[in-house]
Each structure stands twice: as C-alpha cells, then as structure tokens.
Amino acid sequence: MLSSHSAPSGVLSVTVVEAKDLHKEDLFKNDPYVEIYFDEKYKQRTQEVKSSNNPTWNETFTFNIAQGSHEHKLRIRVNDKDLVGSDKIGEGKLDVTDAYNGVIIDTWIKLPAKLGLTSHGEVHLIAQFQPE
C-alpha cells in the first residue's frame, strides 16, 4: 500500500462526465465549462455547453504524475462563459490517493456555496491511474 504522501509515476486519467443543478450566474441558463488542475499554471478545460444547468461533457484529460509526487488533490472549477470573460459557478476538490492505489474513482463532487450552507451544484468525475 502507498503512503498517503507520495505517488508512483504514471498517468492519471480524469473524465469530466456531467454536472447537475448548477447555480445560475446569469438571467438565463449557464454556458458552463470545467477547469481541472493540480497546479494553477497547468489547467485543462472542457468545451463549454450552451444554455444548460445540467450539462454533459464526457471529456477525458490526462496528467503525468511523477514518482513521489505529493499532488493528491485535483481541483475542479466550474465557470459560466460570458461574452466577456467568465463567472465562477463553484469549485471543489477530488482526493485522488485511492486512484494511485489502483481504485477507479467514480464520484460526484459537490460545489458548495459560501460557508458550505447551500450548493452550487455537483460535477460527476471518473479518475483512474495507470502506473508506468
């Protein structure tokens, strides 16, 4: 079993499946997209889905994980694309430690509002790790 502090080298695949009950940022429905990243300098993102608060993406992204990496919290940020810029709908984190240990993670990540008292929706992710 791996320690909770380091990862083996390999490739982490993350599929952004769908989202549900996204908080409306505009008068109309959102044009949501998802950014996923361990590091702000290297973000990957889905295509935007027009006019939906329950979008489906089914897009897969890969992250090369170095031996001994301490990257265990994948950050998820859902945005609403506007004519100029974007508004944040919500954000959450996925602990991928189990994936490094060979478990396929298939889960919904909650996007809590301020103080976590209400929800800005949920994002369905599937993560799996292929060691080198």
Image (cartoon, rainbow, N blue to C red):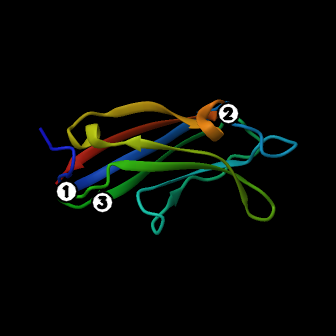
Measured Cα–Cα span from mark 3 to mark 2: 30 Å
Would residue 116 be found to the left or right of residue 71 on screen? right
- Residue under label 3, please give it: 64
Q: Amino acid at mark 3?
A: Asn
> Do tag 1 and tag 2 residues touch (Cβ < 8 Å)?
no
Q: Secondary structure at mark 1?
A: loop
Q: Amino acid at mark 2?
A: Asn
Residue 29 position in % (x across, y down): 80, 40
**Which one is nearer the viewer's eye here, 91 or 46?**
91
Q: Residue at x 42, y 41 (%)?
A: 94
**Which one is nearer the viewer's eye here, 32 or 111?**
111
Quadrant where the image shows the N terminus: top left
Residue 56 position in % (x across, y down): 60, 37
Q: Amino acid at mark 1?
A: Ser
Task: Give the numbered dot on residue 9.
Answer: 1
- Residue under label 2, please give it: 54
Q: Residue at x 81, y 61 (%)?
A: 83
* Label 1 or label 2, whichever comes before in sequence order: 1
Q: Quadrant of residue 22?
A: top right
Measured Cα–Cα span from mark 1 to mark 2: 35 Å
Q: Secondary structure at mark 3?
A: strand
